[in-house]
Image: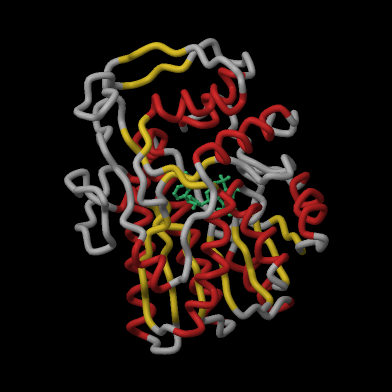
């Protein structure tokens, strides 16, 4: 299948391009490089043995998108492009509504014009409400607590409406829990700009001596070691889920939302200690106050992904820590 991958030079997009190319698909990437580098293209090609095509393009550029789809008839779209920092979305909501919602609207309009009727969308567990009880199934109420999460839910709703309006249109929203790690080759991974927002890249930078210590927010939560619990999954497992979602779209009409997570909760300290043990490095840390708005325990019920997508995670917490550190040490993460 020939596919358009928006945001394909980014963290999750690049890993998914590798899996798609290895599964025999042809890949056309559209990315504005606002949070990634074109240097990743050559590395994707080195891992997969095949190169993706690349177009530097902002999704909000309707004419550019139309020209791209005219030249490249694609059977489906994998839609990763977007901005993703929760705190930034609170400070600058219009950036999020413009980039994520407008970008998606422009993309879906171009798809309609060129008769592209399959889309796999990068959604997020942030669409669930703070009251959701873990394990969180797809039927849990949605009530995102910040503008970023609201953009994800709005895009899901847009896709649901498009499926209702056109019975041939099919969409799956993959609700990611906490993707971490890097490709086992050490050639691609997450390259955050500035101070990382997420735990694993932060741990990596502390271990590498780039940051002095990790602050662990909340030490007296009602969990086994007092720290917050999340569902971390390896980015390569997540990428494989997208290949499975493509097959699923061939079988199942309409709109679906599917969780991608391990179903296992890991505490901050458990992650930290696993990282130190498997990589034989020290990660200095200190406790800090709880952050307002943080949920205590969040992990997925991944049963639907198992039955519908025939997908389950294969990589362990140890693999995630080992691969993240290999990537950090490669020098390519900076
Ligand atoms: N990383 C996570 O923890 C996580 C969790 C849940 C959902 N997601 C979603 O998954 C998707 C990919 O996330 P990621 O971690 O790979 O992020 P990323 O920033 O590494 O990748 C996003 C890519 O999209 C590009 N982009 C952004 N706005 C664009 C635009 N208007 N036009 C064209 N390209 C644009 C960026 O340059 C970047 O390459 C995002 O939609 C994100 O919201 C990520």
Left or right of residue 164: residue 191: right
| Residue 12 versus residue 199 in the image, above or below | below
Quadrant in the picture for residue 257: bottom left
Quadrant in the picture for residue 147: top left
Looking at the image, the residue that sits furthest to the left is 131
Left or right of residue 261: residue 275: right
Q: Quadrant of the C terminus?
A: top right
Q: How many marks?
A: 0
Colouring method of the image: secondary structure
Q: Residue at x 61, y 34 (%)?
A: 322
Q: Quadrant of the N terminus?
A: bottom right
Q: Residue at x 48, y 65 (%)?
A: 311
| Residue 320 versus residue 247 in the image, above or below | above
Looking at the image, the residue that sits furthest to the bottom is 167
Left or right of residue 198: residue 282: right
Residue 293, image x and y in percent?
Answer: 25, 33
Q: Residue at x 49, y 28 (%)?
A: 274
Residue 150, image x and y in percent?
Answer: 31, 52
Left or right of residue 160: residue 179: right
Residue 321, image x and y in percent?
Answer: 56, 34
* Camera-nearest residue between 173 and 32: 173
* Camera-nearest residue between 226 and 242: 226
Q: Residue at x 23, y 56 (%)?
A: 142
Residue 95, image x and y in percent?
Answer: 44, 44
| Residue 113 versus residue 236 in the image, above or below | below
């Amino acid at each position: 299948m020939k596919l358009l991958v928006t945001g394909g030079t980014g963290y999750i997009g690049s890993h998914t391009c590798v899996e798609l190319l290895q599964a025999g698909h042809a890949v056309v990437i559209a990315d504005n490089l606002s949070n990634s580098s074109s240097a990743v293209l050559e590395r994707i090609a080195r891992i997969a043995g095949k190169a993706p095509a690349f177009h530097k393009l902002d999704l909000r550029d309707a004419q550019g998108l139309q020209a791209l789809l005219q030249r490249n008839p694609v059977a489906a779209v994998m839609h990763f492009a977007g901005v993703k920092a929760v705190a930034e979305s609170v400070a600058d909501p219009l950036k999020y509504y413009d980039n994520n919602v407008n970008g998606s609207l422009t993309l879906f309009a171009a798809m309609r014009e060129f008769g592209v009727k399959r889309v796999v969308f990068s959604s997020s567990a942030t669409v669930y409400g703070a009251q959701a009880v873990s394990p969180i199934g797809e039927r849990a109420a949605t009530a995102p607590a910040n503008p970023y999460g609201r953009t994800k839910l709005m895009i899901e709703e847009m896709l649901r409406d498009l499926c209702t309006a056109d019975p041939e249109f099919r969409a799956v929203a993959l609700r990611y829990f906490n993707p971490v790690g890097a490709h086992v080759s050490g050639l691609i991974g997450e390259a955050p700009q500035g101070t990382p927002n997420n735990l694993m890249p932060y741990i990596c930078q502390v271990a590498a001596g780039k940051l002095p210590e990790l602050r662990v927010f909340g030490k007296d939560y009602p969990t086994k070691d007092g720290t917050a619990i999340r569902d971390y999954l390896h980015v390569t497992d997540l990428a494989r889920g997208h290949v499975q979602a493509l097959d699923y779209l061939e079988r199942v009409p309409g709109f679906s939302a599917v969780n991608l997570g391990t179903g296992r909760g890991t505490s901050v300290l458990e992650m930290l200690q696993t990282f130190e043990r498997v990589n034989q490095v020290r990660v200095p840390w200190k406790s800090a106050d709880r952050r307002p708005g943080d949920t205590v325990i969040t992990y997925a019920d991944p049963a639907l992904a198992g039955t519908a997508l025939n997908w389950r995670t294969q990589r362990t917490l140890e693999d995630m820590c080992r691969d993240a550190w290999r990537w950090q040490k490669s020098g390519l993460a900076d």
